[in-house]
Image: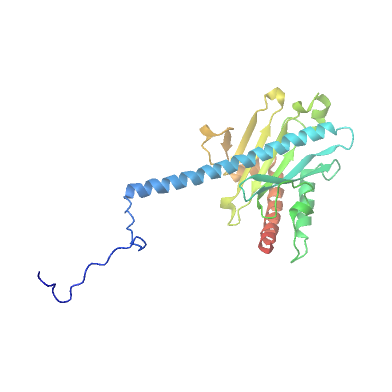
Amino acid sequence: MTEPQHGWRPPAQRSPLHHQGTRRPRLDPLDTDQHTHAAETEQTRRRQDLEWRIFERAREMNVRHADAAWERRYKRPLSPYGLAFIFRQQSGQVAAATKLWLAGPEPDDPVDLLGALVDLARGRAKGQLWDVRREIADRAVGVGDDAVYLGLVMSSLDTRTGTWAQVCRTASSALQIPGTFLYVCGAPDGPDGQRAFVADRRAAGGHGKVTIWSHQAFSTPEILSPHPYLKVSLSTLYQESRVGHVLSWMTALDHEVRVAETDRRARS
């Protein structure tokens, strides 16, 4: 038998525990594009889902506001205006910290009401923790300390077809109470990212139809939307609509709440 040449070594035995480097398959450019598209599609779907959950929470607030105001129209009547501070829970659920007021000179005027709340928020002590769930809202079921503030909703029972007082004189049930609800979400990076919508909700006689005017609040194509909406500019909403002055004060309050919430979360 021929002796092995000098320096020869038998091959090392491969152990099943020995890690062998595994080459990752090189993705075809088409596969990469499809993967990126799928991720973007899922991100878009989640954003659209969140947008409509905010809308549904705002509409729910408006309907409940109408029910409560109708029930109490003779005893301790409510103001036709209410607020909801919208939050997203860590679970992804949308919740709200809400506030309804008793009827009175200030709460019955949306500009006076919002102006007073802006002054309240701006007057908070520097360096002091300020929590909108306790400083303004009086109901915050399901809004945890780790919830993220999204934006501000105003519910109104004064609509384009009449005031709350006028409707009360002719309505026979809460089903005949129409409403309007407004949403603003300020962008920390500037006005280009600001979102807002105004929604008009008709009563049962109008088949509960909801008409929406939106600026970047919805990204679902109109033909696929659960409710049709009209895209409008910020100038149309703020300068040409009948609720422009209300939206301006809502934006100011939203900004103060956003600053306070950023500080609160940084400390928690």
How many numbered discs? Answer: 0
Q: Quadrant of the C terminus?
A: bottom right
Image spot of residue 50 (x, y percent): 59, 43
The answer, for residue 81, to whether it is visible in the render is yes
Can you name the residue that lies furthest to the right here?
75
Residue at 72% over, 37% down: 62
Image spot of residue 136 (x, y percent): 78, 51
Q: Is residue 15 left or right of residue 224?
A: left
Can you name the residue that lies furthest to the bottom here?
6
Image spot of residue 98 (x, y percent): 75, 45
The answer, for residue 158, to whether it is visible in the render is no
Where residue 54 sits, quadrant-wise, is top right
Residue at 18% over, 76% down: 7
Q: Is residue 82 left or right of residue 59?
A: right
Q: Is residue 71 left or right of residue 184?
A: right
Q: Quadrant of the N terminus?
A: bottom left
Where residue 126 sits, quadrant-wise, is bottom right
Residue 106 vertical placement versus 125 (above, below): above
Coloring applied to the structure: rainbow
Where residue 255 sits, quadrant-wise, is bottom right
Image spot of residue 82 (x, y percent): 76, 42
Q: Nearer the viewer, residue 1 or 106?
A: 1
